Image (cartoon, rainbow, N blue to C red):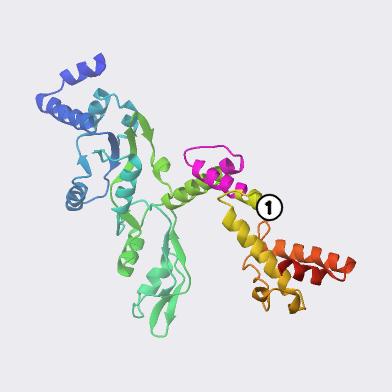
């Protein structure tokens, strides 16, 4: 606390010094401190809000001058410009984003009174008002709504903006809105600013679409992972994927090169068996084949398209069969030679 602030506090009456001390203790006891507007909130509803915040945050309302001095004592001068009108201090250990979300969710619709300023455009929606024909249709038309009597009822023919945001509510408009049950404003604690870890947050900073933010983070993680894998840049998150990718590529190379490795032998045998069966199925003269290969059918084609850098057993078998066809063109006795080999 500055010497000037200390002198100001010393000059206060005893009860005010005690109040400033209690506010200062509150500020020191929590990680996040904010200023909330409480204008227009009835006393009973304010007490209900206090109870709803129990266990999450503490709301303390005091004179603006005393709140200002408590903030100055705590070194939170950035919050002082937000002290004005009917305000209170809110303290919590939650982060500012959670606090803002909770305060916004706790707001409830409420009627607007004559003389209040519209927080947003006030619109009377299209449809049947449910009011019987009478003077009320004139009241609607007087405030700017496109209304008329149809089928024994007063109807609004189109959505009608009867007051723009920032304009003052007239007595006639307040009466019409009350008759229609339209509650154009929200009542709740209006967070003006909050300080956490020395950083000042305005409501605009805290009003984020959590789902969109999470989606952006997931997309960024996926792209970073893809870049790391394709660049062969090992990290804690991608090392296992890189090892699996390298293992697959090594296995594919071993199969194509027919490397007689212990781990590859089962696959090499299956590949050779598929090639043999493909060739046997293309030979018309079954007498040229050993008994166990007579009547065999070619292996079924794979259900999915193979990767560009990998060839399937069937492809290898067909390539071998095509090569065998070329040999048959050069040597009419190829089938007999094959039979002799298997015999």
Query: Is 216 inside the magenta-drawn segment?
Result: no
Is residue 291 visible in this depiction of the protein? yes
Q: Residues within 10 Å of mark 1 (few under 14, many from 20)?
A: some
Q: Magenta region, mostly helix, strand or loop?
A: helix
Extreme residue toward the bottom, this view: 151
**Where residue 324 sits in the image (x, y, percent)?**
80, 65
**Where residue 302 sits in the image (x, y, percent)?**
63, 67
> As displayed, is residue 234 above or below residue 211?
above
Task: Say which quarter of the image contains residue 230.
Answer: top right
> As displayed, is residue 154 above or below residue 108?
below
**Where residue 45 sits in the image (x, y, percent)?**
20, 53
Which residue corresponds to the image point at 42% horizontal and 80% vertical from the top-left? 149
Which residue corresponds to the image point at 57% horizontal and 47% vertical from the top-left? 247
Query: Is 238 inside the magenta-drawn segment?
Result: yes
Question: What range is drawn magenta here?
Answer: 227-250
Which residue corresponds to the image point at 88% horizontal and 67% vertical from the top-left? 331
Given residues 189 and 170, the one toward you in this image is 189
> Which quadrant is the N terminus positioned in?
top left
**Where residue 218 sits in the image (x, y, percent)?**
48, 48
Given residues 55 and 47, the one toward you in this image is 55
Is residue 305 visible in this depiction of the protein? no
Extreme residue toward the top, this view: 3
Given residues 79 and 319, the one toward you in this image is 319
Extreme residue toward the right, this view: 330
Residue, disc 1: 256
Q: Total label count?
A: 1
Which residue corresponds to the image point at 65% horizontal and 53% vertical from the top-left? 255
Q: Secondary structure at mark 1?
A: helix
On the rendered structure, is 325 left or right of 10? right
On the rendered structure, is 33 left or right of 137? left
> Which quadrant is the C terminus positioned in?
bottom right
Given residues 291 and 38, the one toward you in this image is 291
């Amino acid at each position: 606390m500055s010497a000037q602030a200390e002198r100001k506090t010393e000059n206060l009456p005893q009860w005010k010094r005690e109040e400033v001390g209690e506010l200062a203790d509150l500020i020191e006891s929590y990680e996040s401190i904010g200023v909330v507007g409480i204008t227009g909130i009835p006393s009973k509803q304010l007490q209900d809000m206090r109870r709803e915040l129990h266990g999450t945050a503490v709301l303390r309302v005091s004179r603006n001058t005393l709140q200002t001095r408590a903030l100055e004592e705590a070194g939170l001068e950035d919050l002082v410009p937000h002290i004005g009108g009917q305000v209170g201090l809110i303290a919590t250990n939650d982060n500012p984003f959670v606090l803002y979300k909770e305060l916004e969710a706790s707001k409830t619709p409420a009627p607007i009174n004559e003389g209040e300023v519209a927080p947003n455009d006030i619109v009377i929606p299209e449809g049947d008002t449910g009011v019987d024909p009478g003077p009320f249709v004139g009241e609607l038309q007087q405030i700017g709504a496109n209304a008329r009597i149809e089928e024994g009822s007063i109807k609004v023919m189109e959505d009608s903006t009867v007051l723009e945001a920032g304009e003052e509510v007239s007595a006639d408009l307040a009466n019409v809105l009350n008759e229609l049950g339209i509650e154009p404003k929200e009542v709740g604690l209006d967070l003006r600013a909050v300080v956490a870890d020395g950083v000042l947050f305005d409501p605009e900073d805290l009003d984020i679409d959590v789902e969109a933010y999470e989606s952006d983070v997931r997309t960024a993680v996926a792209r970073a992972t893809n870049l790391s894998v394709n660049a062969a840049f090992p990290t804690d998150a991608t090392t296992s994927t890189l090892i699996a990718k390298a293992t697959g590529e090594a296995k594919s190379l071993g199969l194509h090169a027919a490397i007689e490795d212990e781990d590859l032998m089962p696959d090499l045998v299956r590949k050779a068996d598929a090639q043999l069966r493909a060739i046997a199925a293309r030979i018309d003269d079954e007498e040229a084949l050993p008994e166990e290969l007579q009547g065999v059918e070619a292996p079924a084609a794979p259900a999915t398209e193979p990767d560009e850098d990998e060839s399937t057993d069937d492809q290898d078998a067909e390539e071998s069969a095509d090569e065998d066809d070329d040999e048959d063109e050069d040597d009419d006795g190829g089938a007999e030679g094959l039979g002799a080999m298997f015999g």
